[in-house]
Amino acid sequence: MFDLTGKRALVTGGSAGIGLGMARGLARAGADVVLWGRDPGRLEAAAAGLAEFGGRVLSRSVDVSDERAVAAGVTATVEALGGLDVVVVNAGIGVPLAKFAESTTEDYRKVMGTNLDGAYFTLRETTKTLVAQGSGGSVIVTSSLGAHEGAGRNQAYGASKAGVLALANGCAVELARYGIRVNSVLPGWVATDMTGPLQQSEIFNSHVISRVPLGRWATPEDFEGIAVYLASDASAFQTGSSTMIDGGYSIF
Ligand code: NAD
């Protein structure tokens, strides 16, 4: 039921963090995987780290905020894999915290460009392929707990993640008739490069440890299982769902 042998997967933001954790789960379950990211060196290292699972693992440098790069990247990825079954729309960035009145349009556009435009371009181009193939598919979108309540004082980031969740749910409704399922994952606090400065802050670190009922930051490995579940037949009747992976933070 959880076997992904023969499935062909694309993971954006797959060179590090949550995306790499999800890619590891997919590769471990037997899928062939193409990782997208920005840094060719990190992509190569990430792909090499997944080689032990025996499937094909390829990588490609694609900036998801660039519409044409995404379209060309999808064409090349589908050609390399011989088709597409699973898409993980995960690439994302944070923005430096600033008082809202002093925040800049440049930072706002930057976070929207990668997180929301990037998700839109990736969803549109990949689901075009899935519909044309006619064999269904599973799309997993990384949103955030911040999609519901905002991301603290990080207004633009929270707005981008609420937008991503709405895009995913809209796609879930429209694409169900083609057997394409679209589900969202909402991480809480995850120890990745993105949260590096927060992990270094003693005050913030103890806030996370004391507020998360499971008592720690999530790690990229915590996202392996949900990726396998949502990509596989185990979740065959699930679409338009939001799964929180937050150690209980949101209910405390
Ligand atoms: P990370 O910095 O470890 O990894 C981000 C990945 O996205 C990298 O592979 C990077 O190359 C890629 N990326 C960034 N901008 C890109 C672009 N323009 N084009 C292509 N690739 C790009 O961060 P992470 O914490 O693993 O974040 C992954 C996703 O999870 C993001 O969407 C983020 O918003 C979301 N998220 C993270 C947390 C957290 O606490 N870390 C919480 C909630 C949601």
Image (cartoon, rainbow, N blue to C red):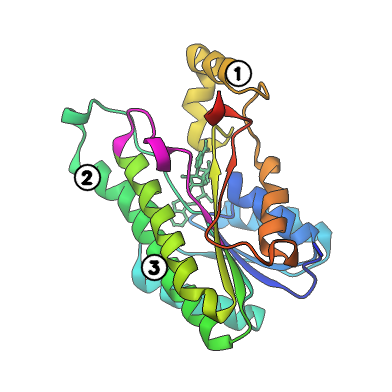
Q: Residue at x 35, y 48 (%)?
A: 160
Q: Which residues are magenta?
A: 140-155
Q: Do the numbered discs 2 and 3 sit on residues whose CB atoms are within 8 Å?
A: no
The N terminus: image quadrant: bottom right
Q: Position of residue 202 (x, y in %)?
A: 52, 12
Q: Is residue 150 magenta?
A: yes
Pointer 1 residue:
209
Tell me if mark 1 has few (under 14), some (14-19) or many (20+) residues whose alpha carbon lies within 10 angstroms of its own: some
Q: Position of residue 173 (x, y in %)?
A: 46, 69
Pointers 2 and 1 in contact (CB under 8 A)? no
The part of the image, by quadrant, that contains residue 43 is bottom right
Q: Residue at x 63, y 83 (%)?
A: 135
Q: Which residue is mark 2?
A: 106
Q: Which residue lies at the image location 49% right of the left edge and 75% below the top edge? A: 175
Q: Is residue 48 visible?
A: no
Residue 208 or 247: which is nearer the viewer? 247
Look at label 3 and name its amino acid.
Phe
Left or right, residue 112 beside residue 226? left
Q: Give me the C-alpha separation between circle 2 and circle 3.
A: 20 Å
Above or below, comparing residue 208 to residue 62 in the picture: above
Which quarter of the figure has residue 68?
bottom left
Of circles 2 and 1, which is in front?
Answer: 1
Residue 174 forms part of the magenta stretch: no
N-terminal label among 2 and 1: 2
Mark 3 or mark 1, which is nearer the start of the sequence? 3
For the residues marked 1 and 3, what is the alpha-carbon distance in whole angstroms? 36 Å
- Would you name the residue on which mark 3 appears? 121
